[in-house]
Image (cartoon, rainbow, N blue to C red):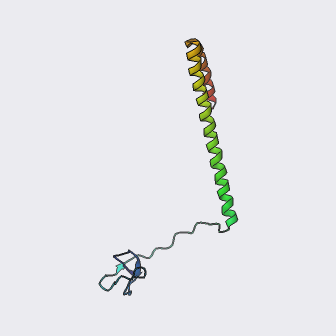
Amino acid sequence: MSFITCPKCWQMNAAGSSSCSRCRYDLSDVGPVAVEARPNPPALPVSRSPARAQDLLRQLDRTQTRKTSKHRDKAIMIGILILSFVLVLVFTGADAALMLLDMIFDILRRL
């Protein structure tokens, strides 16, 4: 099977075409290009019902929200632990801060 590719818009046209089907460029001086015929790839199963598509979008949104809130909760927890360590270090001294740091590492190991 051979085609003529339009040099202006790159549309592939049938070999006997005199002008491009998209931009109407004159193809009389353009030579044909041989193209191997390949089988079409297998079609992916696509749900065409709008209700099913909406359901899939809601499901994806719930999953993303759950992941985001879980990461946000961890970040807030780590921020609180770091702030408490700094406050204990400033107001009570190094010994209490080291004990708190040991507790913080225990908590972080469990997360």
* Residue 32 visible in the picture: yes
Q: Is residue 54 above or below residue 38?
A: above
The image quadrant of residue 7 is bottom left
User: Viewer-proximal residue, 102 or 9?
Assistant: 9
Q: Where is residue 24 shown, x and y percent of the image?
A: 39, 83
Q: In which quarter of the image is the C terminus?
A: top right
- Please state which of residues 59 and 85 is positioned toward the viewer in this rendering: 85
Whether residue 90 is situated above or below residue 10 in the rendered picture = above
The structure residue drawn at horizontal position 69% and vertical position 63%, both measured from the top left corner, is 52
- Of residues 49 and 14, the one nearer the viewer is 49
Q: Residue at x 35, y 76 (%)?
A: 8
Q: Quadrant of residue 37?
A: bottom left
| Residue found 40% across the figure and 80% down from its top | 23
Quarter-of-image position of residue 74: top right
Count of numbered labels shown in the rendering: 0
Check the image and name the residue furthest to the left: 29
Could you tell whether 53 is left or right of 19 in the image? right
Can residue 1 be seen here? The reply is: no
Q: Position of residue 20 (x, y in %)?
A: 39, 82
Relative to 17, 107 lies left or right: right
| Above or below for 111 versus 62 | above
- Tell me: 79 left or right of 17: right
Which quadrant does the N terminus fall into? bottom left
